[in-house]
Structures are given as structure tokens and as C-alpha cells.
Image (cartoon, rainbow, N blue to C red):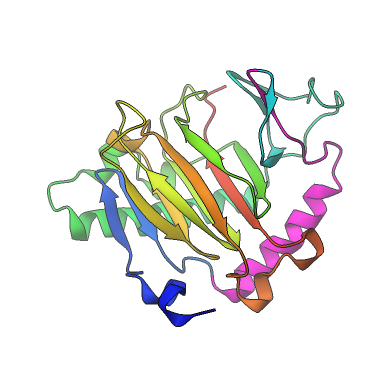
């Protein structure tokens, strides 16, 4: 790839994107990424296959696997009633610890970059962070996700997002509408993105996937390339 367009050519320092939203480039090292990719293969063979959720009569371009809960627009269920009526895999305890680590790192960046911020009041307290669902989304090179809010959870704890595989063009906006102000970010393999507090219900989406940008150890060659995104949330159920 031309160096001018490689991820390293862009500003990749951990930083606050908006009050309550923190980008953590390189959060996962090579060992962690390859281990998570092995877990993805286990999840793919689970009782509920990766599937395209139907929204307003149309299938999403991403394919989703739920851990802990099965998500349908507006609700969480233990059984995938719109797929095959099987129970989803449990939410793994190690993922809680990984989420807590991301929360702690995000709180540190918030404290450094936004001295007036109160991370604890926004739910950025690693000891108390206890997600119970992960939505694992696979994006092929043509997949996108429109601007939306994550608002089907009754608990406003922060969302922790992890990226694996090819880089995506991620747009993070405001809590009022799908338009400006927003910022476009290149989320690369190993990056984490955490949003909570005043940013918890911000509109966000994926504009596209940048093909062939994954490091060699994170290429999803058997899937034809693409990106895996793991988002942890707390349903409140």
C-alpha cells in the first residue's frame, strides 16, 4: 500500500474525540489480536450462526453474532427467535476483564486531555464495569453501517468497541442528529474506541472498509478479507 494512505501516516495517538468518547489506537497487541481471532472461529461455529439482522424489511450488510444476548432492533433476547431459535453463547468472563482494561485506559486519557471531565461520573470506573452482551459484527469489504445510536440498553454504561482485520472509516457524531458535527477516524486492527457519559448516545457509523490494510497476522483471508468489530454493552436486563 502507498505509504501516504497507510494508517501510520495519520495521527494515531490516544485522544478524546468528544467529551466521553476516547480513541485508543493499538490497544490490542499482536498476541491479543490473534487470540481473539481464534475465539471468533469458535463463535462462528456456535449454536447461532453469523446472520444479517433485518431492519425495516432489509438485511444489514454486516453479519452479527451475539454473546450473552441476541440482539434484534429494540430488544435483547436469550434465544435467536428470528434466526433459528437457539440460545446464544454465554458472555465470557475474560471479556469483562478486557472491557475493564479498556475503560481504565480511556479514563486515563480523559483525565489527561480533559482536566474538567469526571470520568467516574460518566461510568468510566473499571472496577464497576460489568458488560453482559457483546455484538460481534463481521464486515466484508463492501459492508457499511449507517449513522445510528446504541440505545436498546437500559443501562447507560459505556460501550467498548474493538477492531480486528482491515481498517474501517468510522464516523462519530453528536447526540442530536446524523449530521455535523462529526469526526471521521480510521479504526485499524487492534484499536479500541470507548464512548459513555455525554457521548453514550452519539450517532456513529461505518462509512466503509479499506481493503488489504490488515497486518499479516490479522488478515481474514479465509473470509475474503474484511473487519471484525466487537462491541461490549450493559443491557440492564
> Where 50 sits versus 29, above or below?
above
Residue under the image location 35 percent in, 45 percent down: 124
Residue range of the region highlighted in magenta in the rendering:
29-56
What percent of the width, then of the height, locates residue 114? Answer: 17, 52
> Where 235 sits versus 227, above or below?
above
> Where 129 sits versus 188, above or below?
above
What percent of the width, then of the height, locates residue 44? Answer: 81, 48
Residue under the image location 27 percent in, 37 percent down: 180
| The quadrant where residue 228 appears | bottom right
Q: Between residue 20 and residue 168, name the one nearer to us.
A: 168
What percent of the width, then of the height, locates residue 113? Answer: 19, 58
Locate the N terminus by quadrant.
bottom right
Judge whether residue 47 is colored magenta: yes
| The quadrant where residue 189 appears | bottom right
Q: Between residue 215 and residue 91, name the one nearer to us.
A: 215
Residue furthest to the left: 116
Taking the image as shown, residue 124 lies to the left or right of residue 48, namely left
> Where 53 sits versus 120, above or below?
above
Report the number of discs.
Answer: 0
Locate the C terminus by quadrant.
top right
Q: Between residue 186 and residue 34, name the one nearer to us.
A: 186
Judge whether residue 170 is colored magenta: no
Taking the image as shown, residue 124 lies to the left or right of residue 115, namely right
Q: Between residue 228 and residue 35, name the one nearer to us.
A: 228
Amino acid at each position: 500500500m502507498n505509504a501516504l494512505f497507510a494508517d501510520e501516516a495519520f495521527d494515531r495517538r490516544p485522544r478524546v474525540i468528544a467529551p466521553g468518547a476516547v480513541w485508543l489506537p493499538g490497544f490490542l497487541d499482536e498476541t491479543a489480536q490473534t487470540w481473539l481471532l481464534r475465539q471468533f472461529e469458535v463463535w462462528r461455529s456456535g449454536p447461532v450462526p453469523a446472520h444479517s439482522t433485518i431492519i425495516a424489511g432489509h438485511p444489514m450488510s454486516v453479519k452479527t453474532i451475539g454473546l450473552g444476548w441476541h440482539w434484534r432492533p429494540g430488544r435483547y433476547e436469550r434465544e435467536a427467535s428470528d434466526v433459528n431459535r437457539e440460545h446464544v453463547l454465554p458472555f465470557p468472563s475474560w471479556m469483562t476483564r478486557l472491557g475493564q482494561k479498556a475503560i481504565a485506559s480511556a479514563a486515563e486519557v480523559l483525565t489527561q486531555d480533559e482536566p474538567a471531565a469526571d470520568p467516574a461520573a460518566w461510568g468510566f470506573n473499571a472496577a464497576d464495569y460489568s458488560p453482559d452482551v457483546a455484538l460481534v459484527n463481521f464486515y466484508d469489504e463492501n459492508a457499511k453501517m449507517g449513522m445510528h445510536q446504541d440505545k436498546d440498553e437500559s443501562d447507560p454504561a459505556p460501550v467498548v468497541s474493538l477492531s480486528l482485520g482491515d481498517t474501517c472509516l468510522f464516523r462519530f457524531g453528536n447526540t442530536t442528529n446524523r449530521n455535523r458535527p462529526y469526526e471521521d477516524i480510521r479504526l485499524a486492527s487492534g484499536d479500541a474506541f470507548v464512548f459513555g457519559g455525554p457521548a453514550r448516545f452519539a450517532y456513529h457509523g461505518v462509512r466503509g472498509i479499506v481493503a488489504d490494510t490488515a497486518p499479516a497476522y490479522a488478515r481474514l483471508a479465509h473470509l475474503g478479507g474484511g473487519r471484525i468489530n466487537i462491541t461490549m454493552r450493559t443491557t440492564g436486563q
